[in-house]
């Protein structure tokens, strides 16, 4: 289900020490894909993983080994192949029309919820 996927996204992000703002961005990307009808049973974990990866790359100052660690974690948690993840990252980019920098009003509601929860 979508809520449980989002929970996984959050837990994994916390394990990798990603900021709440990064998780919030990943949520927005993910919801956009849901609204576009891009999610199905086969790809929803890849969607979730690619959203976390893209958000991490764009909002965090990740070093190469940190990106690799994140991909390892995603692969392990969501049980997909990293090659599929990397390929899907591009699919998500296209679906989001390369608009990875999000307006504050899209990110803030998630951010508030996440920072109040923790």
Image (tube, rainbow, N blue to C red):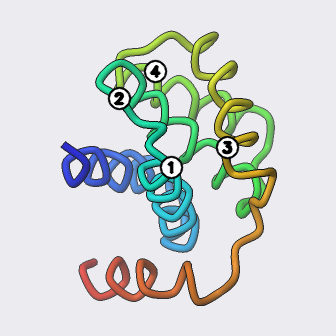
Q: Quadrant of residue 109?
A: bottom left
Q: Disc 1 versus disc 4: distance between alpha carbons?
A: 25 Å
Determine the secondary structure under disc 3.
helix
| 53 relative to 77 in the view: left or right | right
Question: Quick one: label 1 or label 3, which is nearer the N terminus?
Answer: 1
Query: Residue 40 — which label?
Result: 2
Looking at the image, do the residues carrying marks 3 and 2 touch, with CB atoms under 8 Å apart? no
Is residue 35 or residue 104 the one in the foreground? 35
Question: Quick one: label 4 or label 2, which is nearer the N terminus?
Answer: 2
Single out the mark in the foreground, 4 or 2: 2
Where does label 4 land, which residue?
Answer: 75
Question: Quick one: label 4 or label 3, which is nearer the N terminus?
Answer: 4
Crowd tier of the residue under label 1, counting other residues whose Cα lies within 10 Å: few below 14, some 14–19, many 20 or above = few
Q: Measuring 46% from the left and 61% from the top, which residue is drawn there?
A: 27
* Residue 26 location (% of width, % of height): 53, 57
Q: Measuring 43% from the left and 14% from the top, which residue is drawn there?
A: 80
Looking at the image, do the residues carrying marks 4 and 3 touch, with CB atoms under 8 Å apart? no
Where does label 1 land, which residue?
Answer: 36
Determine the secondary structure under disc 2.
loop
* Residue 16 location (% of width, % of height): 49, 47
Q: Measuring 29% from the left and 24% from the top, which residue is drawn there?
A: 41
| 5 relative to 67 in the view: left or right | left
Where does label 3 land, which residue?
Answer: 95
Q: Quadrant of residue 118?
A: bottom left
Q: Disc 3 versus disc 2: distance between alpha carbons?
A: 14 Å
| 63 relative to 54 in the view: left or right | right
Query: Residue 16 — which label?
Result: none
Q: Measuring 65% from the left and 39% from the top, which residue is drawn there?
A: 92
Question: Quick one: label 3 or label 2, which is nearer the N terminus?
Answer: 2
Crowd tier of the residue under label 3, counting other residues whose Cα lies within 10 Å: few below 14, some 14–19, many 20 or above = some
């Amino acid at each position: 289900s979508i809520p449980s996927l989002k929970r996984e996204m959050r837990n994994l992000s916390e394990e990798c020490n990603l900021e709440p703002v990064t998780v919030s961005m990943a949520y927005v990307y993910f919801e956009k894909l849901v609204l576009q009808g891009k999610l199905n049973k086969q790809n929803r974990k890849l969607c979730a993983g690619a959203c976390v990866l893209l958000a991490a790359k764009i909002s965090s100052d990740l070093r190469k080994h940190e990106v690799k660690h994140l991909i390892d974690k995603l692969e392990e948690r969501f049980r997909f192949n990293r090659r599929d993840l990397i390929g899907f990252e591009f699919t998500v980019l296209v679906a989001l029309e390369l608009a990875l920098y999000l307006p504050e009003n899209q990110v803030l509601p998630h951010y508030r919820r996440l920072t109040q929860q923790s």
